Amino acid sequence: MAFRFARCGLLARAALVMAAPAGVVSAGVVALASVPSLQAADTLTPAVATALHDAQTALASHAYDKARQAVDQAAAVSGLSAYDDYVITQMRAAVATQAGDTATAIAAYEKLMASSRTPASARNQMLMSEATMAYTAKNYAAASSAISRYLKVAGPNPQMQLLLVQSLYLQRDYAGVLRTVGPMVNADIAAGRKPGESVLQMQAASAVALKDADTASQAYAMLARYYGKKEYWALLLHELVTRSTIPDSLQLDVYRIRLAAGDSLQARDYMDMAEIALQQHLPQLACDLMAQGYTAGVLGTGAEAPRQARLRAMAEKAAADRKATSAADEQAALAQSGGDALFLVGYNAVLSGQAEHGLALMQQAITKGVSDPAVASLHLGLAQLQANQPKEAAATLGHITGKGPVYDIAQLWLLRLAQGQAPG
C-alpha cells in the first residue's frame, strides 16, 4: 500500500516556528508540507509514512526525544526513495527546530536548500530561519553567514540587515560592522528615512574600538541629529575634545561649540578661550567670551578673580585699539596679494557690530585666496550666525566637506543651528 504525501497530510501541522530575538526579526512560519514542487505522484514508503506520523504525533505533544527516535526509525528503512529522504529531512528539521537543536536543524535546512524539490521562496525562508536560530544560539558567525547569503539572493530586508549588524558586532567584527552599516545608513538618508538608533550606536562603538575617530564623530553627530538625546551630545563632544588630531589653531573653535552645546565650562576654560582669541587677534571675541563667563557666574569670584579682571581689561583695551586702527588695517590688507589679513579685518568688523561690511570683506578675502579655505568657511559661517543670517550660515557650513576636525565642528554647528542656537 502506497501513501500519498498530500493524502496523509504528514507535516501539515509540523511547521517550523523560528525563535527570534525580541524586537529584531520574526521570520514567521515555514510550512514545509506545502512545498509546491512536490509532484502528485510522489508517495512515501508505508514504513516511512508510519514512522513519520509517529514523529508528528510526538512533536505535537512536545515529546522531542520520541519524535527524534521516530525520525531516525524512518531514516533506517531500507530502500528509501529520494522523496522519502526529502520528507524525512523536512520532519528532522521541524523536530530539531522546535527542540532547539540548532546544529541539527541547520544541517537539515542546508540539505533541503540543496534539493531541487525546494523552490526559491522556500529556500529564502529556510535561510532566514537558519540565521535566526543561529543568532538565538549565539552562534553569531553562522548567523552572519546565513544572513549574508539571504540578502544576496533575496535582496534588502531591514530586519535581516539589522540582525546582520548585531551578529557582526557581537562577534567583535567591528570592521564588518562599519562595512555593513555605511551603505544602510546612506540608503536610509537618501530615502528620507531616519537611520536606526541601534545601528548608529553600533557604528559609533565599532569606530571607537577601531580608533576611527572620523567615523565615530559622524555616527555621534547622526545620533544627536536624529534622536537629540543629551547623552549623544555628551559623547559627541567628548569624542571631539579627546581627539589628538585637533590642531592648536582649532582649540578655540572646540571651546566655542562646547559652550554653545551647553557643556560645563570652568573658569580656566573661559580664561583659555579669551587668551587664545587674543593670540588669534580677535580681541572683541575675547571680550565677548569673558562677558559670558561673568554672566554665567563662573568668572569674578574666588582667588583668581583679580587675574580674571586683568585679562578682561586687557581684552577690552585690545578691542579698542583694534577698532581705532580698523580703517588703516583694512587698507593695508586690501593691498596684500593674499586674503588672510583681509579676512581677519572682516571677522573683527563683524564681531564689533559691522556685520554687513565685515562679511563682505571676509567673502572678498576668500575669493582672493586664504591659507586654509576650510577654516575660513567655518569662521565665515560663525560670522554669519553672529550677524543673524542663519540660512546663509547653514549654506556656508554645509559646503565644508571631507573628514577631519573642521568638518566635524561645522557639522556640530549645523546641529545647533537647527535648534535655533547662536554662536558662543
Image: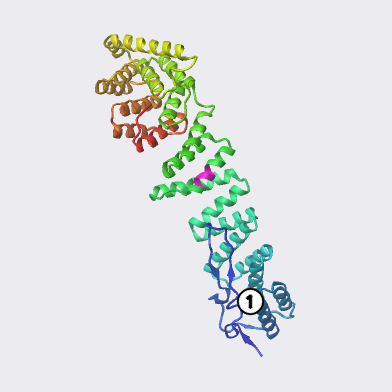
- SS state under label 1: helix
Between 314 and 204, which is closer to the camera in this rendering?
314
Is residue 22 shown above or below 421?
below
**Residue 81 visible:** no
Is residue 145 rendered to the left or right of residue 80?
left
In which quadrant of the rendered view does residue 132 lie? bottom right
Q: Tell me: residue 315, above or below residue 37.
A: above
Q: Position of residue 172 (x, y in %)?
A: 62, 45
- As for residue 200 lying within the magenta part, the answer is yes
- Give the amino acid type for the residue marked by disc 1 in the picture: Ala
Q: Is residue 30 magenta?
A: no
For the record, the magenta segment spans: 199-203
Q: Residue at x 42, y 28 (%)?
A: 259
**Label 1 belongs to which residue?**
60
Which residue appears farthest toward the front when viewing the image? 302
- In the rendered image, the quadrant that contains the N terminus is bottom right
Hey, which quadrant is residue 313 in on the image?
top left
The answer to whether residue 57 is left or right of residue 221 is right
What residue is drawn where x is 38% and y is 49%? 192
Residue 193 screen position, x and y as percent: 40, 50
361 or 295: which is nearer to us? 295
